[in-house]
Amino acid sequence: MSQRIYNELWADAQLELSRLLNEELPAEPPRPEKDRVVFFQRLAMLYVRYIQIFRQLEKVYDQVVHPQKRRVIRLVLDGVIGRVLELKNEMVEKEFSEYHYMDDVLHDLKLRPADLEIPIPRYFITERNKELQKRKTILKDILKMVEMTESPEPLMVKDMSQEEAIKIIQMAERSRQGRLRAKLNEESRNMNRMYRTKYPGTVGIDLAAVCIQKVWRGYIQRKRAKIARDEEMIFLGMAMDPKYQVTCPAEITAWASEACTRIKQEEHEEDYQRSIVAVTKQLRDVEGHDMSKTMKDQIRQWFIECRNATGSFPDYPDEEDGGSALIFAEKTPQQLVEEIAAKEDVDSNNKPKGKEEKKKKGKKDKGKDEEVEEEAGLKMLPSAFLSDLEVGNKTFVDLWQTHNESTNFSQRHEVELIKEEKRKVIEAEIRAQVDEQMRQELAEWKLVVDKDKGGKIKGNAKKKKGSKSGKKKKKEKDLTADRTLESLCQELVAQGLLKKANNVRLQDYLGDYSYLGTTLRQNDIEPMPSLSDVRQVLSLYAILPLGPAGVGKKMLIHAVCQETGANLFDLSPLNTAGKYPGKSGLAMMLHIVFKVARLLQPSIIWIEDAEKMFYKKVPKEEKELDPKRLKKDLPKFLKLIKGEDRVLIVGTTKDPQSADIKSLCKMYSKIILIPRPDYGSRYILWKQLIQKRGGEITKALDLSSLAKISDGYTPGHMVKVIQSVVTKRRVLQQANRPLTAAEFVAPLAKIDPVFQEEEEALKNWYSKTPLGKKRIKAATGKEEEEAPVKGKDAKKKGKK
């Protein structure tokens, strides 16, 4: 598409965003909603509409080449992403579930389930491509170095008795004789056939001709019937035309065009950065002197006006208050002096209030509480991103909506906009320099005037603000201050704690949408989420779940690493067993892991079999591994991770029942249950996985029946079965013998599925988590907790 089309898409997205902002920020605040269902419906509607804007802006930001437009789009895009996450968290709090079913909302808005997918912003990778490539090469070099330094394992010669050797020789000899006999039998059969057909009779020739004619006519007629049937199905819209199944030249051209656009983006961005440097230098050289002179003249004029109005020179505003920026505000000298004096009075008179004021305040608070009680209900939480969205929308409306770009066909930067932006920056720099000079000049003026009057010199010394007395936080000791990042990475790779993520994407985690979730919940039935819901939640949280074995937890870990370019650290109990022994060794291991994780952000610290760290009772066979080794020290290191650090702790488990639920829930802020795949997801999995192995989906392969009988089997089970059936040899035989569902049944029957009892046990365990308990309370109508009991009743209750 052309840049004009992307500009129109941007305009459409901004129009929808302005409508949403008008709904979310009305002139009068809306009254609290008492009906939880109605309130959630409103949240869901906003959530879906913001996702549509998110999808549109992400596409626009990926393809627009104008560098100044891209900055405005990026501001709005980041704000929309933040708002989507806020709405998601609010829906979780109001519905007490990580999964939400919005098929009714999709129906009302005339959208498809695919429109609800959370897109992974491509700029996560593209804008950090050079950095990620550098990290990959460093990790690859370290892995090669570690493999070379590792000593090869000595060849183990297995001792063999004479009887075993004789048996092996006998088996080989019998096999050789069997193959030889089979070859001789085949040759004798071929000779017999040759003798039989050497002198055929006239009757035999006629019969053979008739037989050939029958076979040929039947084959031709069946082929014609199949072609006619396929054409009819395509005409009725029941089947797709084969020409649309192959990637058309237009799509290939579009992909190439998108790649060229990204290259053009980089060129325009480099040109924009060079222009910024040149324009800034030009403004500083040409207009800097005039700016400085004008400011000094205005400040001197203000000094004189203040002295004429008040009889004395004013105090120069502090840097914290804005310096001379306060002088250039549209206020009279008298107003400005009074404002500065008022600020000083407020700072000096911060005294505790008396009893009477407290009583009055108490009465007011009581009145407020009564008002709050009257207006009880569900309200939307304050947003941290709506202000950014307003700024971005205002910038678009004021500048880009009506901007004339008839002469800017190549969509390069505009110099005038750079000048407007950089003038403010240069003006702020010059103002800081002028402030220093004018403070000195004001002090000299005061000195001269006070000497003439014979009065005392008034100092303009700043009052030093008393430092707040508080406990100083202990700084983290750097146990590896003398070591380089490469040496730390090399050590972690050698110990198997830093690993290379597999090349899988989140879109490879296949699954269908849950179409009956809302209907089931309306009938008080809690539906199991689909794999599509899991993929969507992971896109939002990037936190790995709890679920049965083989449902794709490890795959999701690697997918998150690939989508975000994150490094993977493995602190699983089995992986850390025997490494860095002792308390000092454990502290060193955690210190190195968290230090490298923060230096190489974003990072994911993965703990496989997370339940082992919180065992209620350690099994005898695992006591030597010491699985609870990290239980005490790991939470301490988690506190060192700050809010701005992009480090994610992820735990996966298939047996959460064996862990202490309180400790586990305290460690992980989000707990997500991954189910067995439903019918729709199984159908998609069979189809996509077979095609990925080179298999062809024909009418002979009944995928519907295969998806039905594979109920209870995980994607991991399906992959194993497909690998055993769809071999290279079988792929070559497909032309004569198409794949059938019966071929997959036998290997599938050899695998034990995830039984319904196991899934029910996981659901029961999940209901004991904090969010699960809230969900049960909301379902039973006991949403509000009982008020705390005071006095004697509390003592009686405690004794019970």
Image (tube, rainbow, N blue to C red):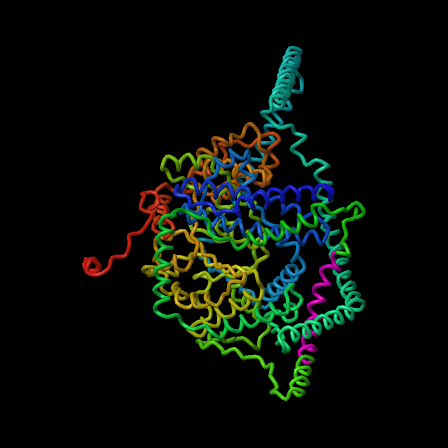
Which residue is rendered at x = 68% and y = 82% of the image? 445
Return the residue nearer the eye: 175 or 676: 676
Q: Is residue 783 magenta?
A: no
Vertical relation: 684 (above or below) 310 = above
Q: Is residue 36 visible?
A: yes
Return the residue nearer the eye: 296 or 523: 296
Q: How far from the left and from the top, in percent, is residue 327?
A: 65, 69
Q: Is residue 437 magenta?
A: yes
Return the residue nearer the eye: 704 or 38: 38
Q: Quadrant of residue 437?
A: bottom right
Magenta stretch bounds: 417-440
Q: Is residue 548 visible?
A: no
Count of numbered labels shown in the rendering: 0
Q: How far from the left and from the top, in percent, is residue 336?
A: 61, 69
Vertical relation: 512 (above or below) 549 = above
Which residue is rendered at x = 70% and y = 35% of the image? 248
Instruction: Locate residue 533 relative to residue 184 in the image: left or right.
Output: left
Q: How far from the left and from the top, in percent, is residue 725?
A: 53, 39
Instruction: Locate residue 139 relative to residue 362 in the image: left or right.
Output: right
Q: Quadrant of the C terminus?
A: bottom left
